[in-house]
Amino acid sequence: TSGKYFRSSVMAFTNNKLFQIFTGEKVDKLLFDSNGKVTGVKTNLKIINSDYVISSSGVIGTCDLFLKSKLKEELEKKNYLKNISIGQDVIDHTNLRVKVFANRKFNSLNELSHSAYKKLLIIFQHFTGKSTILKSPGATSAAYLDLDHDGIIDTKIQLLQFTESGRLGSDGAKSLFDEQPGFSISITLINPKSMGAITIKDSSYNVDPKYLSSKKDIDLLNKALKYCLKLLRSKPLSDYVLEVVDEDKIENSPKDYIINNIYSGYHLFGGSHKAIDANFEVKNTKGLYICDASIFKTHVASNSHASVVILGDIFSKKFIAKNFEGK
């Protein structure tokens, strides 16, 4: 996903496609024949027939589709998905940030977002081959820590070259980033123990990862906050610190700080891992597969991107071997 100038997307691989793309449609239901063989999908506009169906809709999309299809089957007295477990044991990376205002300028995203001149300058530098923030998401150094000393890495802390106005601009500010120079330390629990579920109510899905339902997650975040304060008070970072926002709360009421500032790490995992076999095929069906983050039982890294890329590679080889080799 790293292009010569900018990050690319999966659509860059569809130029020489040997398949059809349907856009502007939402899949409402999976379709089966009397033997439990998938025959295609029903969208809000039409029926699309297919020999195979592969759901790669992500945790929310896959769970939503299967739960709604299951519900419709029950109303129609069918049971192709009756014994399929979907939507349980959903996990998201818990994310927490320590916000720091800096005492000097260093071309942070804060400064760039509020200066047309700096935007033009950094674009010029970018296209003349200089390394700039435009080739990254704004994150720089990262440390992987074993905070509970059990021999297993459990926490990632990462230096972010920006501070946000509230939580993702939630304080109503016109800009996402603060106006003055600043940086943040992002804390991510690599394998959180808190688990939730995706459910369907009144034809709409509800996602509840039940953040902080595990005491171990709170304990690790507490240790991570202490580590971050120690880091910020040490050189060279201390030379850049003007103010650690809510430093007193972090130090004296860490649990309250965690509860009031925790939010999604945007890496949902799980929900359909009990529904598939070793070939990614949905149990009790034929020709129906799932290949996305929903089939992971637990997080295997602090970011889901590489894990899902590897998953796609493994699935494609298994799918071809099972369905097309020798034909």
Image (cartoon, rainbow, N blue to C red):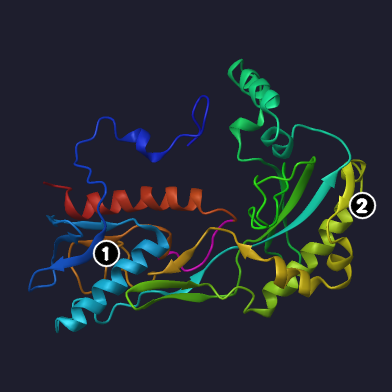
Dominant SS type (magenta) = loop
Q: Position of residue 147 (x, y in %)?
A: 76, 65
Q: Position of residue 227 (x, y in %)?
A: 83, 60
What residue is shown with label 2?
Answer: 233
Residue 296 sits inside the magenta stretch = yes
| Residue at x-position 84% and y-position 61% | 246
Magenta-tinted stretch: 295-301
What residue is shown with label 1?
Answer: 281
Q: Is residue 35 visible?
A: yes
**For this view, does 48 lie left or right of residue 93?**
left
* Amino acid type of the residue that numbered disc 2 sits on in the rendered structure: Arg
**For this view, does 38 lie left or right of residue 94?**
left
Where, by quadrant of the figure, is residue 105 drawn? top right
Check disc 1 and report its element: helix, strand or loop: loop
* Amino acid type of the residue that numbered disc 1 sits on in the rendered structure: Glu
* Alpha carbons under labels 1 and 2: distance apart: 52 Å
Q: Nearer the viewer, mark 1 or mark 2?
A: 2
**For this view, does 105 lie left or right of residue 44?**
right
If you read the primary sequence from the N terminus, does the residue marked by circle 1 or circle 2 appear first?
Answer: 2
Q: Is residue 150 visible?
A: no
Residue 193 sits inside the magenta stretch = no
